[in-house]
Image (tube, rainbow, N blue to C red):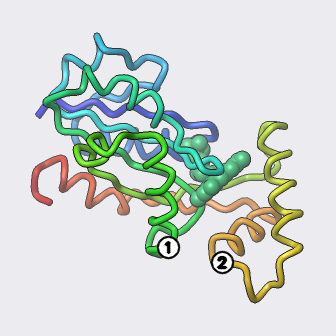
């Protein structure tokens, strides 16, 4: 099945997953800004990938906008965040974000996968640094015992860069693409 992987990545984690995926599937990869209705019409399967950014999924808005042109294709989206997707609470939160970006019909037709990225506070854009500084201030006000694992992970990532990208984590998505899932 001819497959296109579209990604939007600020710091490289989603790009890395998109490139691994394209290699594994012998698929094409394109940055989100290159993905338009003309490009996607050449593919039977289209996968979008995007990082999680404080309640929004990068690339989700573009996928929703292109949805008309994606009709009849196999569709998937993978998210890349710092939070651990093996915790069902984190996935629940991501899917709440997805429900703001997609209609219920879209949510039914898109298969979602969740992957772990990384964070390097030192190399962040000023706007993201400011967002993270605000978040840190808020989290430090919370008693430690009340912080979720996601919140603890965010705080830990301030002190040293973390990178949880893992090629093997793509296995379920690759299996889905090959129709083995
Ligand atoms: C401003 C900001 C907000 C973020 N918000 C979240 C979040 O809500 N949930 C999460 O799991 N990760 C969050 N992250 C971590 C990113 O999702 C993570 O760094 C991911 O690897 C980014 O992928 P990218 O480099 O491909 O854009 C945030 C990072 C930044 C800089």
Residues at marks 1 and 2, CA–CA distance in whole angstroms:
10 Å
Among the 4 quarters of the image, the one containing residue 40: top left
Q: Please indicate whether residue 61 sits to the left or right of residue 73 in the image.
A: right
Q: Nearer the viewer, residue 122 or 32?
A: 32
Q: Secondary structure at mark 2?
A: loop
Q: Badge 1: how crowded within 10 Å, few (<14), some, or many (20+)?
A: some
Whether disc 2's CB lies below 8 Å from ligand 1 is answered no
Q: Which residue lies under the disc numbered 1? A: 89
Discs 1, 2 touching: Cβ within 8 Å: yes
Q: Secondary structure at mark 1?
A: helix
Q: Badge 2: how crowded within 10 Å, few (<14), some, or many (20+)?
A: few
23 over 55 or under it: above or below: above
Q: Quadrant of the C terminus?
A: bottom left
Q: Please indicate whether residue 34 sits to the left or right of residue 111 in the image.
A: right
Among the 4 quarters of the image, the one containing residue 136: bottom right
Residue 148: assigned label: 2
């Amino acid at each position: 099945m001819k497959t296109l992987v579209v990604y939007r990545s600020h710091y490289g984690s989603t790009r890395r997953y998109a490139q691994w995926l394209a290699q594994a599937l012998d698929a094409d990869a394109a940055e989100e800004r290159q993905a338009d209705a003309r490009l996607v019409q050449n593919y039977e399967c289209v996968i979008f990938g995007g990082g999680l950014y404080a309640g929004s999924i990068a690339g989700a808005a573009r996928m929703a906008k292109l949805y008309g042109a994606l009709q009849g294709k196999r569709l998937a989206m993978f998210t890349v965040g710092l939070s651990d997707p093996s915790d069902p609470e984190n996935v629940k939160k991501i899917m709440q974000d997805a429900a703001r970006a997609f209609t219920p019909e879209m949510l039914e037709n898109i298969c979602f996968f969740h992957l772990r990225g990384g964070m390097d506070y030192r190399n962040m854009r000023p706007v993201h640094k400011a967002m993270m500084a605000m978040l840190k201030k808020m989290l430090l006000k919370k008693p430690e015992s009340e912080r979720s694992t996601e919140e603890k992970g965010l705080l830990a990532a301030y002190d040293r860069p973390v990178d949880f990208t893992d090629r093997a984590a793509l296995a379920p998505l690759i299996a889905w693409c090959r129709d083995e899932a």
